[in-house]
Image: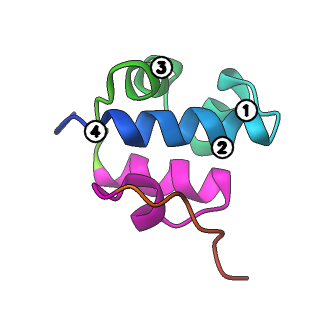
């Protein structure tokens, strides 16, 4: 765990809910533990970069859009 970004956790939770993905399913899709995802969503505890990439990929967005320090929402990953 590296840093804190509550807005990233909020973006992940919103994207996950918008897509109807339960936390346990996102954990399996991204190969990131439920504890790590929960900490990210609740407290903004950022995981290592490899985990951030897997979470973004599982949600279909770019890492920059999901974990940018500036607000602006997540953008769909190019096909």
Q: Nearer the viewer, mark 3 or mark 1?
A: 1
Mark 3 Cα within 10 Å, few/some/many (few <14, many 20+)? some
The span from disc 1 to disc 2 (Cα, nearest Å) is 5 Å
Disc 4 marks which residue? 5
**In whole angstroms, how far apart are the C-alphas of marks 3 and 4?**
13 Å
**Residue at image point 52% right, 42% down:** 11
Q: What label sits on residue 15 in the rendered view?
A: 2
Q: Earlier in the sequence, mark 3 or mark 1?
A: 1
Q: Check the image and tell me how it is coloured.
A: rainbow
Q: Quadrant of residue 61?
A: bottom right
Farthest residue in the left direction?
2
**Dot 3 corresponds to which residue?**
38
The magenta segment is 49-70
Sequence-wise, which precedes: disc 4 or disc 2? 4
Percent coordinates x, y for residue 28 in the rendering: 66, 34
Measured Cα–Cα span from mark 3 to mark 2: 14 Å
Front residue of 45/11: it is 11
Q: Which residue is mark 1?
A: 17
């Amino acid at each position: 765990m590296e840093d804190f970004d509550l807005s990233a956790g909020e973006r992940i939770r919103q994207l996950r809910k918008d897509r109807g993905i339960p936390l346990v399913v996102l954990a399996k899709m991204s190969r990131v533990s439920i504890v790590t995802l929960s900490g990210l969503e609740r407290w903004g505890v950022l995981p290592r970069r490899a985990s951030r990439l897997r979470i973004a990929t599982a949600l279909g967005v770019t890492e920059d859009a999901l974990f940018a320090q500036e607000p602006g929402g997540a953008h769909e990953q190019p096909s």
